[in-house]
Image (cartoon, helix red, strand yellow):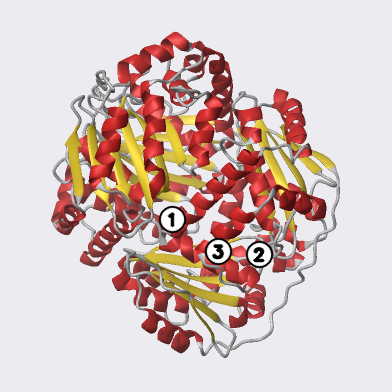
């Protein structure tokens, strides 16, 4: 079984979390950096994600090819992702390779940002932007969030545009790195089957020399708004709509009631929207999410259907979310059972534990045992949901549609 | 330790007790799949795989769904090329309930006719929305042209087949396929063999009927170049060529050869196209196989002005593999494949599923040590022997985008 979570904060501010479980067949390690699109200036748009790619492109002692080959030699399943507010580097390996993986990943977090590699990788990023341009619902999500959050940076584009990425210089990226990748803005996490003492000692030795400085982020709530916007695109066969309103932030205790409500209303099966739209064949996708972010958050609906049905589908979705408390006690208990089961199943694998520990610390600076999370989910009442709605949601909705030209 | 046995009605039962987990998973394979859809009715099986959960035994559609959710069983019912599949994961003590609900669906589904138009409507929307995902569409279009009928059928069904299938079509497939004779039920996780066996006997012991004969894999069409004009930011380039079958001699040499090319990060395609030339974001080569056929699929998506270079480098790397493999490279690919094996088998869900696959293809479940030893036996010479038999050409090539490309010399030959 899993041991308790060990926590240590190094003098330079880096937080280290470790949860050892000898029964696992693998171990996971990851760096969680509290930085993303919302921490970019306009001229830097896309730099967080571009930098994430550059972490794989060489360090003072390793070339890009060295890194690729070493990851191969370790049999590592390694990757990284960038969101509006986090950049996470992670890997899973078999236990014997854990220490070598730790050394490699730690070294990667101090990138060389070689100018030639920078220019080459820029081309890869521009291809990635082109790839997503061919996927219409990504375009709708990005465009509608940008509009919905307005001047609040939570709506910044993660990929950036062809123009913004083309214009980013190596020096701008270096500035951004120096500004955001301070140890006090990062968390190192290890889970699964790995040597605990050695991991802690290596982390102190390797990361302890990183120098710190203060890193900030404005975490106010976004202003609420209610708009209707319609976008048109050529060569589109399907239509999509996003409805969005205020929701709980990652720090608000209302996130539990609102995630339960999202499950009741819009889980992929057995939810209100499922029965109204998918079961009846009106839409091929329908979901509701509580999108909790740093200091702010939203509650959103997504549907996709054929263009001639979009009006009908949106109006049914509005009716469902417009009567959010129209559920039975049994509906609420089922939503709890679904969420609890997801938490337990995800928690069995080192990567699942890694993500939940790392994200929780990054957002809330807390460590909650699985059993306690389960208890909090189980304790939610109808009144909690009602109070949460009164606090955040359903006052004003914005609506965005994407249709063929 | 994996326990296997068969019930009197033929149902194969596989049980793996795992000590370090709290959850359990099941995976039930029933022979059938798209290849068993009647001619002209491709998509009928898809309708069945959805309809089967819309009411069964004493439960209505909604009651059945709620019964799964009440105890937090994450479940799915689906169809593959040659099979129907029912799988689910849950916290251990719900397994009995899960098996009861699955047995209702496979043994006593209502298949309500009034629900069929709703399912058809969603399936038609899925077919339409394929154009909004060009990478996926390219693979579907290549599959259509590369494989012999009925193995070339699109996983989303065909428009005509979906529209013209009715309850009779669906019921015929159900009667033909849904028997225990060759079906496999695999369970893994926090379970005890004797308790599981008692549950399986209780819920599936009285199930009767035969199983479908899955059609033979026939002669593939001649290789060709296909271009589909499409207005988009990127050009999709996809190619497919024959490879080693599952369990054929040299199977792991083939898997390793394809991984030398296609592995993310260290594979030659990733390094040469993406890392060294910045030609693309997404590039890969994959090996897929059953006991009747094997295929290598390669893909790259890139903007139009770089499409020709991308195709040329891709083909060049594939053709240049023979004679150029280093020991380091081979060791890396082997380490990687073995690590993936260990890490991919950690959860009850993945154990249940890979045990089913082994049984389906081999009639037994291989221990990890046996697969690991097979991988260890691969040498540079055995990779070259594989490449001599399956040199990644002739291949079929498909592009989806603005302009046609020039086909590299020797890529497309005659028939197979």
Nearer-the-camera pick, B201 or A175: B201
Give the side of residue B224 with respect to residue A334, left or right.
left
Nearer-the-camera pick, B59 or A233: B59
Give the side of residue B12 with respect to residue A368, left or right.
left
Q: Secondary structure at mark 1?
A: helix
Q: Position of residue B277 (x, y in %)?
A: 47, 59
Q: Pointer 2 and pointer 1: residues touching (CB < 8 Å)?
A: no
Around disc 2, counting alpha carbons within 10 Å, would you say few (fewer than 14), some (14 to 19), or many (20 or more)? Answer: many
Q: Pointer 3 and pointer 2: residues touching (CB < 8 Å)?
A: no
Around disc 1, counting alpha carbons within 10 Å, would you say few (fewer than 14), some (14 to 19), or many (20 or more)? Answer: many
What residue sits 68% from the left and 57% below the top?
Answer: A255
Mark 2 vs mark 1, CA separation in Å: 30 Å
Nearer-the-camera pick, B64 or A293: B64
Q: Dividing the picture into quarters, in which one does residue B172 lie?
A: top left
What residue sits 47% from the left and 17% below the top?
Answer: B111
Q: Nearer the viewer, mark 3 or mark 2?
A: 3
Dot 3 and dot 1 within a common chain: no
- Pointer 2 indicates a residue of which chain? A
Give the side of residue B346 with respect to residue B66, left or right.
left
Give the quadrant of the C terminus of chain A: top right
Q: Position of residue B8 (x, y in %)?
A: 18, 26
Q: Earlier in the sequence, mark 3 or mark 2?
A: 2
Q: Which mark is residue B241?
A: none
| Residue marked by disc 2 | A85
- Pointer 1 indicates a residue of which chain? B
Q: Is residue A120 visible?
A: no
Residue A9 to residue B317: above or below: below
Q: Which mark is residue A372?
A: 3
| Residue marked by disc 1 | B273
């Amino acid at each position: 079984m899993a041991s308790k979570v060990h926590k240590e904060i190094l003098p330079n501010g880096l937080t280290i979390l470790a949860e050892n479980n000898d029964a696992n067949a693998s171990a996971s390690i990851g760096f969680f950096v509290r930085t993303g699109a919302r921490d970019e200036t306009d001229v830097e748009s896309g730099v967080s994600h571009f930098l994430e790619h550059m972490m794989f492109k060489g360090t003072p002692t390793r070339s890009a090819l060295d890194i690729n080959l070493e990851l191969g030699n370790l049999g590592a399943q390694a990757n990284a992702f960038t969101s509006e507010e986090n950049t996470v580097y992670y890997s899973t390996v078999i236990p014997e390779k854990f220490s070598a993986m730790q050394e490699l990943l730690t070294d990667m977090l101090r990138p060389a940002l070689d100018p030639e590699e920078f220019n080459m990788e820029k081309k890869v990023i521009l291809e990635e932007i082109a790839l997503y341009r061919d996927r219409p619902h990504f375009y709708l999500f990005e465009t509608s969030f940008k509009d919905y959050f307005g001047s609040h940076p939570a709506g910044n584009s993660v990929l950036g545009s062809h123009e913004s990425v083309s214009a980013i210089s190596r020096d701008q990226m270096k500035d951004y790195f120096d500004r955001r990748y301070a140890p006090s803005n990062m968390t190192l996490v290890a889970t699964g089957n790995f040597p605990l003492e050695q991991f802690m000692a290596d982390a102190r030795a390797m990361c302890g020399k990183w120098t710190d400085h203060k890193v900030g982020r404005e975490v106010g709530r976004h202003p609420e708004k209610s708009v209707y916007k319609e976008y048109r695109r050529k060569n589109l066969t399907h239509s999509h709509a996003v409805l969005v309103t205020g929701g709980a932030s990652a720090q608000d205790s209302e996130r539990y009631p609102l995630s339960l409500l999202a499950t009741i209303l819009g889980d992929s099966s057995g939810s209100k929207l499922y029965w109204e739209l998918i079961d009846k064949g009106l839409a091929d996708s329908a979901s509701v999410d509580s999108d909790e972010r740093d200091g702010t958050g939203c509650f959103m609906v997504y549907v996709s259907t054929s263009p001639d049905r979009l009006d009908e589908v949106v109006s049914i979705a509005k009716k469902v979310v417009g009567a959010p408390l129209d559920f039975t006690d049994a509906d609420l208990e089922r939503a709890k059972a679904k969420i609890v089961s997801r938490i337990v199943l995800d928690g069995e694998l080192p990567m699942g534990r890694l993500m939940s520990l790392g994200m929780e610390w990054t957002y809330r600076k807390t460590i909650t045992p699985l059993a306690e999370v389960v208890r909090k989910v189980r304790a939610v009442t109808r009144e909690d949901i009602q109070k949460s709605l009164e606090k955040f949601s359903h006052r004003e909705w914005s609506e965005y549609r994407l249709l063929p030209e | 330790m994996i326990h296997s046995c068969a019930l009197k009605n033929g149902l194969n039962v596989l049980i793996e007790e795992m000590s370090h987990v709290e959850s359990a998973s099941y995976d039930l394979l029933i022979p059938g799949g798209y290849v068993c859809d009647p001619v002209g009715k491709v998509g009928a099986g898809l309708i069945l795989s959805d309809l089967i959960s819309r009411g069964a035994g004493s439960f209505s559609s909604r009651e059945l769904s709620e019964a799964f959710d009440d105890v937090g069983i994450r479940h799915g019912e689906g169809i593959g090329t040659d099979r129907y599949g029912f799988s689910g994961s849950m916290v251990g003590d719900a397994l009995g309930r899960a098996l009861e609900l699955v047995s209702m669906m496979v043994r006593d589904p209502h298949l309500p006719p009034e629900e069929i138009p709703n399912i058809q409507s969603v399936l038609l929307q899925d077919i339409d929305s394929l154009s909004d995902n060009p990478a996926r569409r390219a693979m579907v279009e290549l599959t259509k042209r590369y494989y012999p009928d009925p193995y070339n059928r699109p996983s989303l069904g065909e428009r005509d087949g979906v529209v013209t299938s009715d309850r009779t079509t669906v019921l015929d497939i159900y009667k033909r396929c849904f028997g225990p004779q060759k079906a496999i039920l695999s369970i893994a996780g926090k379970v005890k063999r004797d308790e599981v066996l008692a549950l399986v006997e209780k819920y599936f012991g009285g199930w009767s009927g035969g199983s479908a004969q899955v059609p033979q894999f026939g002669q593939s069409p001649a290789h060709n170049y296909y271009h589909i004009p499409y207005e988009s930011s990127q050009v999709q380039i996809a190619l497919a060529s024959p490879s080693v079958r599952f369990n054929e001699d040299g199977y792991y040499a083939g898997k390793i050869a394809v991984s030398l090319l296609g592995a993310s990060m260290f594979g030659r395609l990733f390094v040469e196209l993406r890392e060294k030339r910045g030609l693309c974001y997404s590039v890969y080569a994959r090996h897929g196989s059953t006991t009747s056929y094997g295929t290598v699929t390669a893909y790259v998506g890139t903007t139009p002005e770089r499409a020709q270079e991308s195709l040329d480098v891709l083909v060049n790397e594939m053709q240049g593999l023979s004679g150029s493999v280093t020991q380091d490279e081979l060791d890396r690919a082997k380490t990687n494949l073995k690590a993936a094996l260990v890490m991919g088998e950690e959860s009850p869900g993945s154990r249940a599923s890979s045990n089913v696959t082994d049984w389906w293809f081999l009639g037994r479940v291989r221990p990890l040590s046996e697969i690991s030893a097979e991988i260890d036996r691969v040498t540079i010479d055995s990779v070259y022997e594989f490449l001599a038999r399956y040199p990644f050409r002739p291949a079929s090539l498909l592009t989806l985008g603005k302009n046609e490309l020039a086909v590299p010399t020797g890529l497309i030959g005659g028939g197979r």
